[in-house]
Structures are given as C-alpha cells and as structure tokens.
Amino acid sequence: MRFATVSGSICLVLGLLVYSTAAAEEELSKPLPVPRLQVLPLPYDQASVAEDGEEFSRYHFGKDLRRPFLYPIIGPSGRSVTRMGHPRDPNGHSHHNSIWVSHMDVNGVDFWADRGEKATGRIVHQRVVRYEDGNDQVLIQVVNAWQDSSQNETLLDELRTMRFVRQPQGEWLCILDLELAAKGKVVTLGKTPFGMVGVRLAKTIGVKDGGGRILNSEGARDEAEVFWKPAKWVDYSGPISAEEREGVTIFDHPSNPNHPSVFHVRNDGWMGASVTFDGERVIEPQKPLRLRYGFWVHSGVLDQAAIEKEFLSFVENKDDPSALEKK
C-alpha cells in the first residue's frame, strides 16, 4: 500500500510537470506583437532609435556634454544627413552638434557656444521620463536643467519630448516639443539669432561644398534670399552620395510665439530657427515657454508644394506632450 501511495504521488507530480510544460509552451506560442520601432537604451547615456533593429537616430545626453543632441540622422540612403562640427572650422564651431537645442543669451549666460567668457551655460540631463515603442512612432521624453556653471545655478527646467514618426521609403519626421520653466525667478532670453534649434548638415549637402539648395516657404532660395528672413519652414537638400539627393526641413509650428520664425541659414551647410531674432522673450515663474519644431528627413530635392504638404500634415498633429507624463 505504501509503495502504491508513493507511486501515485510520483505520477501526480510528473503529470503536473507535463501540464505546466504544455501550458508554458502554449503561452510561448502566442507572443505579444513586437513593435517595429523601438528606443534602445545604450551605455554612456545614449538612446538609439531603430526600426526593425536598424538605427536611424540616436540621442546623446551624457553629463559631460555641453548640451544633448541627436546624431546620426539617417536618411533613406542609409547615410547621416547631418554631421558634427563645421567642415571648415571644427574647433570654432564645435557646438554644431548635428541637431541640437540651445540659446546664446539666457540671463546673459551663453548656452550656445563652447568657448568664450560668457559661455558658462550647460544643458544637463536630469532624468528620463519615459521611452515608448510603437509601430508608427516612438517617443523619448527627458528632463534637463539649464545651468550656469559659473554660479552653480539652474536658470531653467526643461521638459523635452521627441517623437520619431517613420514614413515610407526611409523618410521620417522628428517632432520636438520644448517646455522651458523659469527656476524661481524671471529668466530673459536675450535678442539674438542664435537659438532655439540648429541643424548642421552633411558637408556634401551644403550649397558651398556640395552644390546643395536652400528653399523656404516663401519660395526664396539660398543664403542671399533666405538669411534672416521669416518663413514657416526652411529646407536644405543636396547630394548625400554620387547618385542620391536628400535633405532636412525645419518646420516652425504656428503656436510658436514668433511664427513665422526668422531663420538663420548659411550656404556652408547650417540652419536654425530663431525664437528671439525680433526681440527678447521673458519667461516668468509658473508661465513656461512652450515651443514645437519639426525636422523632416526626406529623399530628393523637393519643390515648394511637396514640402508645404508635409508642413500642413505636421501642423495637423494635435498630440499634446504636456499630457504624456500624466498617462
């Protein structure tokens, strides 16, 4: 009887193991969908943005940097349409970090340049709020502090939201939302063409070095017509290889305080949207400054109508970044 009882117990255990294994296999046979677009955290304070395992951008936010930035910006050809630094002056323009956010005059402190008596400003990463994967778009949301290193003081708290929207044939759109909040006292963004966003194009896309082309929403072309002129958008396109042409368009959202923005654009391959070209902007405590820009990475040297169509699609996007953290 005792042997029969032990044998029965062993059979029961084996049966449970067989059932558990079968249940586990059934669970594995019904996996959850794997998002095509993913944000992949990397060592050394970086986050890669990839589609089906292929990186098309990367966010750099190490605390030893002067400011966070996006690099590379991979176009449909598989090459980056941006670069780090000026091709003719890499030292004097070391602050040209592919696609970046910055400003030359925040209460008199220079966050734009890497050198100079007033260049004591640093935009320092504080924390990642969230990474979100998806099939059509992914999201990176972070908190940064605009710090004056000479006074050990934080002037602005920044909530930065970047949404990467994939499009057909390797094109894509980055929607950048900024919320800048004064830290305890009034902060003034001084009158300057340098800030709030900049793009340093690949050398071969530049008008001067590669025979590229600049076009704005008003139909003006190249530096002579576009420099320090207001526009809804500015496109910079040119050769990325012997056979292919690609470009980047900066979209200025109609909700921005100085829309249409004045653009600072050069034939040497850089462009930026200036939120303070027309005058200073005051940020009071409890009244943050909110800005939205788009960066469209596309193939070809497109005409005005094609870019305008994409701009209108950008404007119609009603996602509210202020609600993302609360979900």
Image (spheres, rainbow, N blue to C red):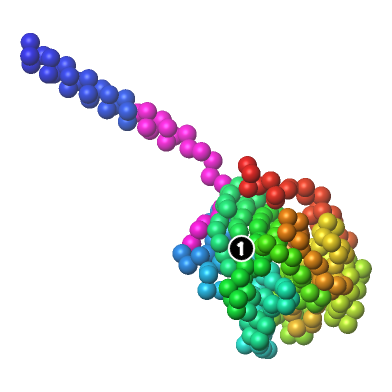
Amino acid type at mark 1: Asn
Q: Is residue 31 magenta?
A: yes
Instruction: Report helix, strand or loop for mark 1.
Output: strand
Residue 29 horizontal side relative to residue 287, left or right: left
Which quadrant is home to the C terminus?
A: top right
Q: Nearer the viewer, residue 61 or 285?
A: 285
Residue 77 pos. (x, y %)? 65, 67
Q: Nearer the viewer, residue 253 or 9?
A: 253
Residue 322 horizontal side relative to residue 57, left or right: right
Q: Residue at x 51, y 65 (%)?
A: 45
- Label 1: few (<14), some or many (≥20) within 10 Å? many
Residue 117 pos. (x, y %)? 66, 86
Q: Residue at x 26, y 22 (%)?
A: 15
Q: Which residue is mark 1?
A: 144
Q: Residue at x 17, y 22 (%)?
A: 10
Residue 1 pos. (x, y %)? 7, 10
Q: Nearer the viewer, residue 89 or 303?
A: 89
- Span of residues in magenta: 22-42
Residue 161 horizontal side relative to residue 190, left or right: left
From the viewer's perspective, is residue 112 above or below residue 290?
below
